[in-house]
Amino acid sequence: MLAAAREVFASQGPDAPVSAVAERAGVGIATLYRRYGTKEELLQKLTVSAAEQYSQAARTALAAEDPWEGLAGYVRECVDFGPGSLAPIAGTVRFTAEMAEAGRVSDRLAEEVVARAHAAGVLRADATTIDVFQVIEQFSRRAPVPTTADADARERLVALVLDGLRARPDNTDFPLPGRPPSAKRYDELWRKD
């Protein structure tokens, strides 16, 4: 049901009817409501599920022998999950303790992936964890009716961006423009108390 919910809310936005989720999941609306008491609860569980997927991808990255391959694999895996499709949900549901905890774990693990890449000298020094999150968010959004060409273009563009994140001797001559993105602002997007 969560996979169906992600597809529906990704293509139709947070105002999509729950009946569309039930239909996509191949279950009756009553079954969906027995599992998730309200639409808001379904959306909350969907965000927790996404954070858990990020966490698992980070654990896999940290287990990789090569820090660059770990980071690059983390980005590619998270893009494949499609969490950017959840961006329209940000701020539309009450923020729960479960969401906060899943987010804290996910953020901590992502910080470890980035710190490991920095320590190995394979990630440009001026790239931050929030930069990595924003890359994932931008490239994980899906077209309402995705095609193979969309997936091919996304894979190609992610490879180009990853190449731009890789540390090189000449990176220091060309620092990233602007100030690094704020973690506080990123977190505020999700908070609806």
Image (tube, rainbow, N blue to C red):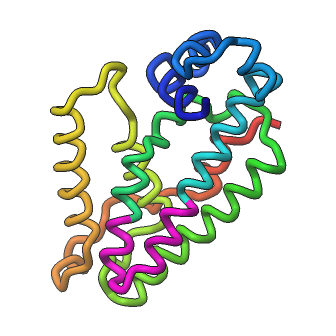
Q: In which quarter of the image is residue 167?
A: bottom left
Residue visible at 34% across and 57% down?
76
Quadrant of the rendered image containing residue 112? bottom right
The stretch drawn in magenta includes residue 169: no
- Residue 125 picture location, percent across and down: 36, 79
Question: Is 169 on the left-hand or right-hand side of 115?
Answer: left
Query: Is residue 63 a member of the stretch shown in magenta?
Result: yes
The residue positioned farthest toward the bottom in the image shown:
120
Q: Which residue is drawn at 76% across and 53% down?
A: 100
Q: Say which quarter of the image contains residue 94.
A: top right
Magenta residues, dominant SS class: helix
Where 186 sits versus 152, above or below? below
| Residue 117 on image: x %, y % | 39, 81
Q: In which quarter of the image is the C terminus?
A: top right
- x and y, in percent, of residue 17 in the image: 62, 10
Q: Quadrant of the N terminus?
A: top right
Q: Tally the numbered discs.
A: 0
Q: Is residue 76 left or right of residue 49?
A: left
Identify the residue shown where x is 38% and y is 42%.
140
Residue located at (67% from left, 12% from top): 28
The picture places residue 75, in percent across and down from the top left corner, at 38, 59
Q: Nearer the viewer, residue 42 or 166?
A: 42
Q: Between residues 163 and 142, which one lies in front from this camera angle? A: 142
**Magenta region:** 55-73
Front residue (pair 7, 126): 7
